[in-house]
Amino acid sequence: MQSEEKQTIEIVKKVTPAVVSIGVSKSLAQVKEMALGPFGPGLSPFLFGGRNPEIKSDEEESQKIKIGGGSGFIVDSDGIILTNKHVVIDTEAEYTVVTNDEKEYPAKILSRDPVNDIAILKIDAKELPTVKLSNAKIEPGQTVLAIGNALGLFSNTVSKGIVSGLARKISAAMGGAENEGQPQVEELRGVIQTDVAINQGNSGGPLINTEGEVVGINTAVIFGAQNIGFSIPVEWAKRDLDDLRKFGRIIRPYIGLRYIMLNKDIQRRYKLPVDCGALIAQDHIPGSHAIVKNSPADKAGLKENDVILEINGKKLDEKNDLGDMIQLLKAGDEVNLAYFRKDETHKTKLTLEERK
């Protein structure tokens, strides 16, 4: 029988050739604009000290500076790569993939998942090594490995641990040009918790089981905690890949409302009439609305402070989150809702649309 150590070594040898490093770069002119702008992303205005008269504008445009990086892994020998959306979130940046044999390729972003922290890249290469996406169920306590470009400096860093929990819900800060350099907080639901060491730069790398198959995409850590990391379940990535092959893009269902899942504690605190369901409520982001105008929720007549109790006959509670239920459906599906408004229960129907 093969020892655990030898098994781990064989898994690493099998998977490492398919793991890549992803570099993020911008022109010097863009970086200066970020640094010297009145509301830049925390870069010091003294970093460049103003415009250098020795560098002309066209030279600034052509000179590239690395501003970040992450990891990814090849899932198709023709150059299809999975990574995190937050690694490639900046639409103005240029992306470069470095394979395990140190070859460098410009990367094209094929699609960014509008809901989950997943992105799909493409490089112009053939007959690349790939890693298999697992169909096996994962369990708390099972052994897993993470491989990635730790800190953007140490490629093919391997760490080992166990699955600590499943179906976790966390809030993660995601930066990038799309939000003018300011952190954007995203809710990640249903993620895998592990005690595997995941460092900055590991984002987008694979979480591997003892069969050498991908069970997740490493995505986030809790700073200040000891060995608490999170990974996106591989099932979500498989669905994205299927969408890309069928439709040329990732399609996600959209209902068009903001909500808070209720429990008994929230009911007592705010003296609400019910202790479960999804309370339609505006968040604290300036300019946001509880109901998006002309969305499926708006067309169905839903209003702020309504509480959605059921979706297609299934009760909503802390274990059955509205967002999770919606993501199990498809754009175009008709949905039956039961909701509570002013001491009365009502019913309505709506048709989910594609999230843009």
Image (cartoon, rainbow, N blue to C red):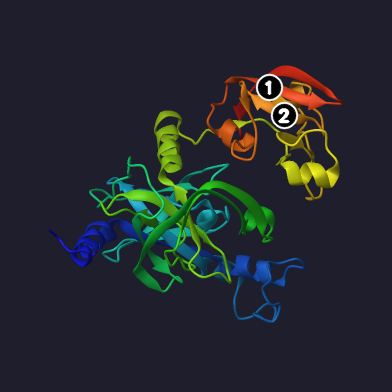
Q: Position of residue 24 (x, y in %)?
A: 49, 63
Q: Amino acid at mark 1?
A: Leu
Label 2 crowd bin: few (<14), some (14–19), many (20+), radius 10 Å = many
Picture residue at 51% right of the left edge, 49% below the top = 191
Residue under label 1, please give it: 337
Q: Quadrant of the C terminus?
A: top right
Which labelled disc corresponds to residue 308?
2
Q: Is residue 76 left or right of residue 230?
A: left
Picture residue at 60% right of the left edge, 35% below the top = 320
The residue lying toward the viewer, choosing from 137 and 45, is 137
Q: Position of residue 200 (x, y in %)?
A: 49, 68
N-terminal of the pair, mark 1 or mark 2, is 2
Q: Position of residue 72 (x, y in %)?
A: 40, 56
Residue 239 falls in image quadrant: top left
Q: Amino acid at mark 2?
A: Ile
| Spatial CA span between label 1 and label 2 | 7 Å
Q: Position of residue 350 (x, y in %)?
A: 67, 20
Picture residue at 65% right of the left edge, 71% below the top = 32
